[in-house]
Amino acid sequence: METAEQIKTEILRLTREYSALVHRANRPGDDPSRTTPFIPGESTVPYAGRVFDGDEVAAAVNSALDFWLTLGAEGEAFEKEFARRLGVKSSLLVNSGSSANLLAIAVLTSPSLGERRLAPGNEVITVAAGFPTTVAPILQHGLVPVFIDNDPITLNARVEQLEAAFVPGKTKAVMMAHALGNPFDLATVTEFCRRHQLWLIEDNCDALGSRYDGQLTGSFGDLSTQSFYPPHHLTLGEGGAVNVVRQAPLRKLAESFRDWGRDCWCASGKDDTCHKRFGWKLGELPEGYDHKYIYSHLGYNLKPLDIQAAIGRQQLNKLPAFIEARQRNWQILRRELADLEEFFDFMLPTHATSWTPDGFEWNDSGHRTECSWFGFMMLVKPDAPFTRKEFGALLDEAKIGSRVMFGGNLVRQPAFTSLRKLQPGAFRVIGDLSGADRIMNEAIFVGVYPGLTESMMAHIVETMHSFCLQGQP
Ligand SMILES: Cc1ncc(COP(=O)(O)O)c(C=O)c1O
């Protein structure tokens, strides 16, 4: 009769064996054991996807066999390891990047923050072109997003508009994303926030591993957020995190809002961590009301499963190689497509002025960015002999995955045009947002994720060349 431990060991051995056979296409592009043949034009070139091996599958099965399910020991370990890696005080797991953004804003509405809390009607400065759930939580909390424009080449905020967006007494925070792995101008934004005493939330969902002056993005603001959805730098299937950069008390607030709004901080399955579970007197509740059921906030339940955290811990081990592959793939595409500059404006890192085969040239700000790229973005020039739509259709036909820059100019999305009609004043716009419009009309990106093989990259380069140089419509 085998013991439970022996059975488990055998299950995990078989799991690894199974994964090695069936998950070949999910391995890194440079893995020699990956034997799936690539047929240009027939096989797909995803723009992103899960990259994993037997480690992640075995970790998931191991955690499933334990059947704890809800956030537990794996979650706690992941949060510690992730926070250490990012260089922040702590990280809190949630079930998506969108939930992380929702939670980050919610935390800052806590009455316990006094004068600095975000109250209904307060304004939050953000950027017009990007992902919708960087902005939606601002509106969902009765706050007013104030959109500044994007630079179409870096995709990041035109920071010279920050002062025009600021209203004393009304503006309370800045929340923006590091676009496609490109750090926004953190020197200017952090100085602006310090000078006006504003909260800064960095949406770091697409930029894990990016650096600004050598320091990891996501470690500059008060809070930052991650997404662990499959196209991102590491994946837990679904998942996200709120990072508390410096102020430890924000962690307790984030836990409260994440976990139903409760005042109690006991982990799942634990009771009486405070040693006075029946000794509290809060609100207008009777003396000694069970602390487990006292709510200091109007909260949510945004927790992921422990199985996801177990997968994430394995992904974390691979993160340095993932980042390196993304950077390598970006440079390959940039070098191989350099002769197509008459058709495209290629994306540049913030503070860079141009790309050369020997590296980027930089402006005289003295600041440097290092991108952990989410994708390879190009703008189809207005005078190119083809449109972005035609170029996108060509990529589709060649089975090359591509994406536009998410929601484009968000204020042109139906959600915002109807809001403008129903609730004038729900958001404000600075300037004409011409940069965001250019991004909406001209930007398209292909993948750089670690699953791309040399043949896939060659197919991307070859397809773009033959279209641009020989065969536009
Ligand atoms: C910048 C940005 N923020 C937030 C999100 C939302 O993340 P999730 O899909 O995990 O909800 C995304 C999604 O990709 C994103 O690109």
Image (cartoon, rainbow, N blue to C red):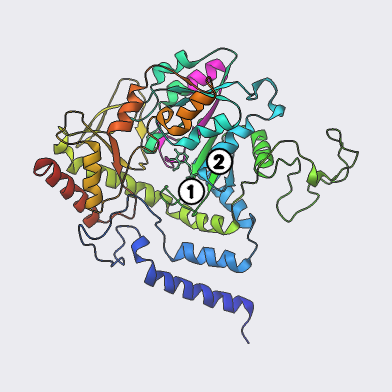
In the image, is the residue at mark 1 within 8 Å of ligand 1 by its beta carbon? yes
Please state the extent of the stretch shown in magenta in the rendering: 190-216
Q: Is residue 453 left or right of residue 258?
A: left
- Relative image position of residue 5 (x, y in whole percent): 61, 76
Q: Secondary structure at mark 2?
A: helix
Mark 1–mark 2 Cα distance, whole angstroms, equals 11 Å
Horizontal relation, residue 370 to residue 71: left or right? left
Residue at 44% over, 66% down: 54
Vertical arrangement, residue 18 with respect to residue 268, above or below = below
Hey, what amino acid is under mark 1?
Phe
Q: Which mark is residue 100?
A: 2
Residue at 52% in and 39% down:
225
Q: Nearer the viewer, residue 272 or 213?
A: 272
Residue 120 pos. (x, y %): 63, 24
| Whether residue 318 is visible | yes
Return the residue at label 1: 228
- Residue 463 has which mark? none
